Image (tube, helix red, strand yellow):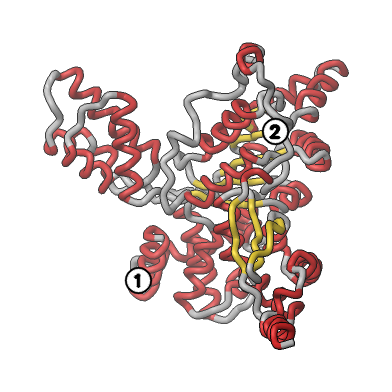
C-alpha cells in the first residue's frame, strides 16, 4: 500500500511522465502556424519531433544552420506555446538530425559503375567557384550560409533568393557555387547559369521564328535550378521582363529553385515592373557588404597561395588596410605587385608597393554602388530631425525643403542614378524639380557654412557605413 501511494505521489509530482510530448508538440505546432508571423513560419516548417526523454522534448532540424537560426528566432515562442498546452514548463532541446534531410534511396553497391556514368560538368558553370574557396566574413556570412542551404535543398529553402551588393563582393562566386554544388551532388538536376544580358540576347534572337521561341521557352522553363546574374540589366527591357515573369511563375509553381543577383536592393530598380519586383521580393533578399580588414587579409593570403604570389607580410597588411572597396580591387593590387616583381626581378618592398598602388589607394571615387537613396534619405532625416516621408513629399516647411534639396543633391553625387531615376524614387518628382534641387545646393554650398557642414557630415556618415 505504501509503495502504491508513493507511486501515485511521484506521478503527481512529475506531470510530464503522464504526458505524450509528441501530441503536445503537434498541438503546439498547429497553434504556432496560426500565430507566428510569416518571417518565423519558414523556420517552424524545418522542425521535426525527434523524441521525448525524461520529460524533455527533443526537436530536430536537418542542419546546424537551421538549428542555430531556429533557436535564435523561435525558441521563446515554442517554449511558451508548449508550456501553455502542457500547463507547466517543458524542457526543450534542439538537435541536428541529418538523416531527416531527405528520403533518398540507398546508394547502389555498384559505386564504380555509377561514377563512370556521371554526366559531364555543366557547361554554363565555372568550376573555379565553390563554397570551399569563398572566404566568408561578417559582411557575407548570412548570404554564404543561405546559399549553402539552397544548394543542399534546392527548391525547398529560400525560394526565390536575391543576392544584392556592389561590384566585386562575391555575388557571382556564390551564385556559381550553388550551381557547382548541386551539379556535383545532384548531377541529374538541370541547372542553367546565365546573365541577364545573355538571357535578353537569347530572347531577342528567339523572336526570329516560332521554332526558336519554342526552344527558348523549353530551355528555361524545364530546369530544376535557374541562376541569373545582374538582373538590373533588365531595366527598360519590357518584353524580356514579360518573358522572365512567365518563366519565373512556371518554375516557382513547380517548386524549382530560382536565385538572382543584383547590384542594388530590388526597391531601387526603377524600370522593373511591379509584378516582377513583387516576385523577386517574395523570397529571401540578402545583401553583401565590403569585407572587413580581417576578411580582406584572409582573402589576400588565399589568393597568394592559389597563384603562388611571393608578397611580404607587411606589404599584404598595407594592401588590406588601404584597398577596402571590394575583392576585385584587392585581387588587382596583388596581381599588379606580383607582375612587377616578376618583370623587374626583385622583391616588392613597402615603398615600391606604395608607388605601384597609388592608383588603387587614392581616395575612392564618390560614386558608390553600396550607397542607396534610402540610406541618403534616412541619414538626412536624422540630421535634420524630420520624417523620411516628408522629405519624399511636398511639404513647404523650410527645414524639410532644405533636407529634401540636400537628399537629392547627395543622391546625384553619391549614386549612379540619373536625375529622372532619382525623381521616380522621390515620389515621382519630375526631371526639372530634381535639377532645381541640385542647382540650388550647388549655388549655396560655398557661401552657406551650415549647408556645407550638413552635407559633409551626412556624406561622411554614409561613406563610413
Q: Which residue is label 1 attached to?
A: 453
Relative to 191, residue 429 above or below: below
Tag 1 or tag 2, which sits nearer the N-term?
2
- Name the spot of residue 294 as percent of width and height, x first: 31, 49
Q: Which residue is label 2 attached to?
A: 225
In this orientation, which residue lies closer to the viewer: 409 or 130?
130
For the point 71% across and 24% down, which residue is it? 188
Q: Is residue 42 visible?
A: no
Mark 2 vs mark 1: in front: 2
How far apart in space, not on screen, are marks 2 and 1 (Cα)?
Answer: 51 Å
Which residue lies most toward the front here? 1
Relative to 404, residue 419 above or below: above
Mark 2 element type: strand
Mark 2 residue crowding within 10 angstroms, few (<14) / some (14–19) / many (20+): many
Q: How many marks?
A: 2
Quarter of the image with the N terminus in it: bottom right
Quarter of the image with the C terminus in it: bottom left
Relative to 312, residue 62 above or below: below
In this orientation, which residue lies closer to the viewer: 200 or 454?
200
- Name the spot of residue 410 as percent of width and height, x first: 47, 60
In this orientation, which residue lies closer to the viewer: 2 or 197?
2
Amino acid at each position: 500500500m505504501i509503495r502504491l501511494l508513493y507511486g501515485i505521489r511521484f506521478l503527481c509530482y512529475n506531470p510530464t511522465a503522464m504526458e505524450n510530448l509528441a501530441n503536445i508538440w503537434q498541438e503546439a505546432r498547429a497553434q504556432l502556424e496560426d500565430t507566428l508571423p510569416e518571417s518565423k513560419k519558414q523556420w517552424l516548417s524545418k522542425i521535426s519531433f525527434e523524441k521525448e526523454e525524461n520529460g524533455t522534448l527533443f526537436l530536430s532540424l536537418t542542419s546546424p544552420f537551421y538549428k542555430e537560426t531556429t533557436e535564435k528566432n523561435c525558441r521563446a515562442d515554442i517554449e511558451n506555446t508548449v508550456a501553455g498546452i502542457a500547463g507547466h514548463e517543458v524542457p526543450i532541446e534542439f538537435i541536428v538530425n541529418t538523416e531527416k534531410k531527405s528520403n533518398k534511396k540507398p546508394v547502389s553497391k555498384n559505386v564504380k559503375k555509377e561514377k563512370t556514368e556521371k554526366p559531364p560538368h555543366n557547361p554554363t558553370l565555372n568550376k573555379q567557384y565553390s563554397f570551399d574557396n569563398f572566404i566568408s566574413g561578417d559582411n557575407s556570412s548570412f548570404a554564404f550560409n543561405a546559399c549553402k542551404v539552397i544548394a543542399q535543398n534546392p527548391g525547398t529553402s529560400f525560394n526565390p533568393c536575391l543576392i544584392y551588393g556592389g561590384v566585386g563582393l562575391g555575388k557571382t562566386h556564390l551564385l556559381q557555387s550553388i550551381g557547382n554544388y548541386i551539379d556535383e551532388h545532384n548531377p541529374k538536376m538541370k541547372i542553367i547559369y546565365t546573365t541577364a544580358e545573355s538571357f535578353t540576347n537569347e530572347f531577342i534572337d528567339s523572336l526570329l521564328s516560332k521554332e526558336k521561341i519554342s526552344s527558348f521557352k523549353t530551355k528555361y522553363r524545364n530546369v530544376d535550378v535557374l541562376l541569373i546574374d545582374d538582373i538590373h540589366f533588365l531595366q527598360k527591357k519590357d518584353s524580356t521582363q514579360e518573358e522572365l515573369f512567365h518563366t519565373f511563375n512556371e518554375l516557382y509553381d513547380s517548386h524549382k529553385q530560382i536565385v538572382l543577383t543584383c547590384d542594388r536592393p530590388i526597391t531601387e530598380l526603377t524600370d522593373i515592373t511591379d509584378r516582377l519586383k513583387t516576385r523577386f521580393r517574395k523570397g529571401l533578399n540578402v545583401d553583401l557588404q565590403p569585407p572587413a580588414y580581417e576578411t580582406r587579409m584572409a582573402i589576400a593570403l588565399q589568393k597568394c597561395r592559389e597563384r603562388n604570389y611571393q608578397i611580404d607580410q607587411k606589404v599584404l597588411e598595407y594592401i588590406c588596410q588601404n584597398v577596402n572597396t571590394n575583392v576585385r580591387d584587392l585581387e588587382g593590387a596583388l596581381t599588379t605587385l606580383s607582375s612587377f616583381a616578376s618583370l623587374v626581378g626583385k622583391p616588392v618592398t613597402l615603398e615600391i608597393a606604395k608607388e605601384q598602388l597609388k592608383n588603387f589607394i587614392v581616395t575612392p571615387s564618390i560614386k558608390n554602388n553600396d550607397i542607396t537613396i534610402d540610406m541618403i534619405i534616412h541619414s538626412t532625416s536624422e540630421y535634420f530631425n524630420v520624417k523620411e516621408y516628408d522629405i519624399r513629399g511636398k511639404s513647404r516647411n523650410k527645414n524639410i525643403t532644405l533636407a529634401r534639396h540636400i537628399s537629392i543633391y547627395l543622391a546625384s553625387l553619391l549614386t549612379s542614378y540619373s536625375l529622372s531615376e532619382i525623381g521616380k524614387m522621390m515620389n515621382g518628382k519630375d526631371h526639372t524639380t530634381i535639377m532645381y534641387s541640385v542647382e540650388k545646393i550647388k549655388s549655396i554650398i560655398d557661401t552657406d557654412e551650415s549647408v556645407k557642414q550638413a552635407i559633409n557630415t551626412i556624406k561622411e556618415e554614409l561613406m563610413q557605413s
